Image: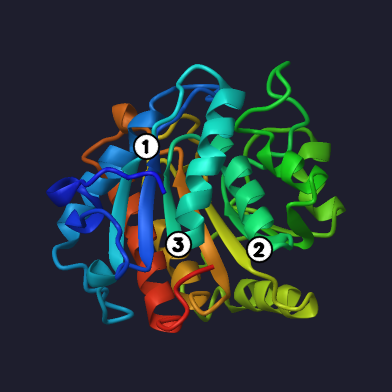
Amino acid sequence: MTAFAFLSDSGFLKCGAPGATTPYAVAGVAWDGSTTNRSGARMGPRAIRSASHMLCDGTHPHFDLSPVEALGDAGDLPLPNTSLEGMRAALQPLAAQLIARYHMAWLGGDHSITLPLLREYRKQLGRPLAVIHFDAHCDTWVDHFGEPSGHGTWVYEAMQEGLVVDACFTQIGIRSAGEREAREYVATRGGQIFTARALRGLESPAQLAPVLQAIRQRLAEHGNPPVYLSLDIDCLDPAFAPGTGTPEPGGLSSNQVLTILEELADLPFVGMDCVEVAPPYDHAELTSQAAAHFVWTYLCGRLAHRPSQPLV
């Protein structure tokens, strides 16, 4: 296995490298070669790690536990920075080693990193995955401004490749400009979409209960497949996350995202990514703080609900 970097006090929650006794791990995928507006997401992993240091001992107020003793940080994966296909080809074997040993949280990077990760999860699990996808953008375009692939095509590609259970693909927070065919692509494939407009004013567990139940019901109807979480930070309104490459007004609040993560923590998640944090456009570290909280909440939820089954 490749020796991953030891980060010591610079790691997520100040964790060192993952080892035999750390069943959970984070790793950075510092790539933003597919951004269509403002680049800078390659700096996201470092900013998210730094923001996580504000969490002190990491004890979560809802789950009442800390993931620190069960967590390691594998550092930023060594990747080429000029070729999308080169990055994906290099990322997948590195991810394979980590996925085989740890329950992973991936720190992006732009959203083009999710496709090779899903390819590897599909390969190792031997079955397609359910996906919960937070985003302002549908990411279902058939090309990337004339190029065959990019950070706005990965959902389309994942469905075309059979990496996911289409009916168990849930999008949350969608609101960007785009032709109807792209905006509704997931629904036409049998998945479900909860737009940001449909979620306005809904923040508490009780208010979001219909959304939560719809996700659970869809998974149950299809045998509760393994679930992957892909969280684009631009799902948040720019008031909560200005530091991203393609901000879209009218987005979710931090409370909405946290409620959904906390209430669905018992689902059979196998991994997650948090992408599109672009520190050059951030203010007062609002975006990296939100990202760190989301990753931390996810990890605490996994530890709370699957303490004896940390691996995929």
Q: Nearer the viewer, residue 17 or 59?
A: 17
Question: Residue type at mark 1?
Answer: Pro
Kindly report which numbered mark, 1 or 2, lies closer to the viewer in this rendering. Answer: 2
Numbered tag placed on residue 242 in the rendering = 1
Q: Element type at marker 1?
A: loop
Q: Nearer the viewer, residue 227 or 248?
A: 227
- Taking the image as shown, residue 143 lies to the left or right of residue 267, namely right
Task: Tell me which label, 3 or 2, sits earlier in the chain.
Answer: 3
* Residue 19 seen in the current view: yes
The residue lying at 31 percent from left, 67 percent from top is: 22
Q: Nearer the viewer, residue 90 or 10?
A: 90
Question: Residue type at mark 3?
Answer: Arg
> Alpha carbon of mark 3 to alpha carbon of mark 2: how far?
13 Å
> Alpha carbon of mark 1 to alpha carbon of mark 2: how far?
36 Å
Q: Which residue is mark 3?
A: 101
Task: Tell me which label, 3 or 1, sits earlier in the chain.
Answer: 3
> Alpha carbon of mark 3 to alpha carbon of mark 1: how far?
35 Å
Q: Quadrant of the C terminus?
A: bottom right
Q: Position of residue 132 (x, y in %)?
A: 61, 60
The residue lying at 36 percent from left, 54 percent from top is: 26
Q: Position of residue 130 (x, y in %)?
A: 68, 63
The residue lying at 29 percent from left, 70 percent from top is: 21
* Residue 236 seen in the current view: no
Numbered tag placed on residue 125 in the rendering = 2
Q: Which image quarter: residue 161?
A: top right
- Asked if 246 appears above or below 70 in the picture, the reply is above
